[in-house]
Image (tube, helix red, strand yellow):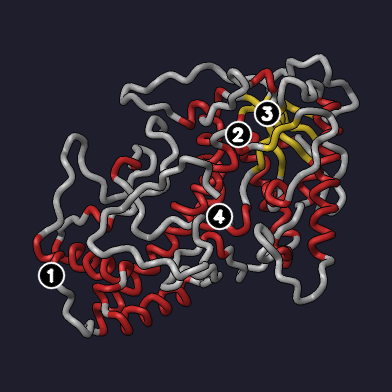
Amino acid sequence: MAPAGFTPPRISSRIPRPIKAPGAPRANKIPVSDCNDDTLTKSTSSALSLPENQPPPTCPHWTSLPTEEPLTPEMKDEVRMALRKFYHFYRKDLMFRRDTKFCWMPDSMMLRLENVTPKKLNSAEVTKFCNKPTFLYWAHAAQIGDTCPGLIFGCIYKSWLRYYNDELNIEFGHFFASPVRITSTGPTSVLGVLKAHKSLCEQVSSTLRKVGQSEPGYTYPPPWPKPQYYKLLPLCRAVIVLLDKLGPEPDLDSDGFINLDVCLQQQTVLLIRTGDESGLSAPITFESIIAQSLPLARCDITGNFDAVRVSLATAVGFIANLMQREEAAFPNSRDPSSIDPALCPPTEHYSDEALSAEAWVDTIMQEADSKGIDNVLQTSDAVRQVKATKRGEFIPACRFTPYHFDSRWK
């Protein structure tokens, strides 16, 4: 769920948004009409972006005219292609980006570690630790007035996507890590953080066992619509990331933007082996990144700990490589057909169905056949997008703008 006061970006549209069916719980969805030119950033703008200082054009007059029906077979194929493109954009660049951001920003959404013995986690907090290869512990000394700068998340997100590219797994909360914000009363030593980490892993594992042992036919309440897809990964038990001090204040480039790649190199973190490597295909070793390591700069790391200080860029790459190693060693550990229903775009009745791209397109086209192309928002925009592309024209309503992070980053 979005935090209080959240206003989703808006896409202008000529067709009213479909009315939500009574009782349909869709409050956490971003309607397909939602996007706004104000959310455009230098780092995420699409190929349809306007040149700097050029005002957005108005829609051509012909776009307000009714669509001729039935569509030709060629036009129908192109509309289906446009809908497929939107399906993938909505899941990855809107919903996944939004949900991942809300785990990191604002930091009030992070789990707080106030003691070496963590508090009891609720179900929503447990899911945040599922399907992550590591935890990132944010030391109180690395916070600014009890606040965790969002810039770190921007760096991690950019670097993580770079390693996975089109193969990125966005289902059921898969990401680099979940952040844990250590408060002023929380552990300050590496040993204290490791003890807390072990306790958190035991809590998550215990909750997952209880959920998995529920009676057959039991309807799982949110956030457990499909509990079989929520797992505590063995890597998560084996290695942690500790951000114990902030890097230098980032400088603006000549274009006025903060270069995340520079921040990735300037920010350092500790990678720490926990000693629990059960379930891994092979032991973890830091040999491959020793040449890139920096002084530990801590007096509480002795021969009892296997730790290394590296840049944030190196840490993300190291975890990504470990994750890819484990996925290759256990190819059956992931169901490639699994689809997180929370990321799927809405259909006529705003149902929380886990639809594949083709199934969703079929549903939308069937709705259009029944109601008319112009009476279904998705097909109405798709037809005009296809026509505008053929004419070499621009329609603001058809622009795909990813969910906004920060307009200062690139």
Q: Residue at x 9, y 61 (%)?
A: 61
Residue 91 visible in image: yes
Q: Residue at x 44, y 52 (%)?
A: 94
**Image x and y of residue 377, in percent:** 31, 67
Q: Residue at x 69, y 21 (%)?
A: 140
Q: Secondary structure at mark 3?
A: strand
Task: Give the label, 1 or 4, closer to the camera.
Answer: 1
Q: Residue at x 26, y 51 (%)?
A: 48
**Mark number displayed over residue 108:** 2
Which of pointers 1 and 4 lies earlier in the amino acid sequence? 1
**Residue, disc 3:** 138
Amino acid under disc 1: Leu
Q: Residue 350 or 379: which is nearer the viewer? A: 350
**Image x and y of residue 243, in percent:** 67, 27
Structural distance between the alpha carbons of marks 1 and 2: 47 Å
Which of pointers 3 and 1 lies earlier in the amino acid sequence? 1
Structural distance between the alpha carbons of marks 2 and 3: 13 Å
Q: Secondary structure at mark 2?
A: helix
Structural distance between the alpha carbons of marks 3 and 1: 55 Å
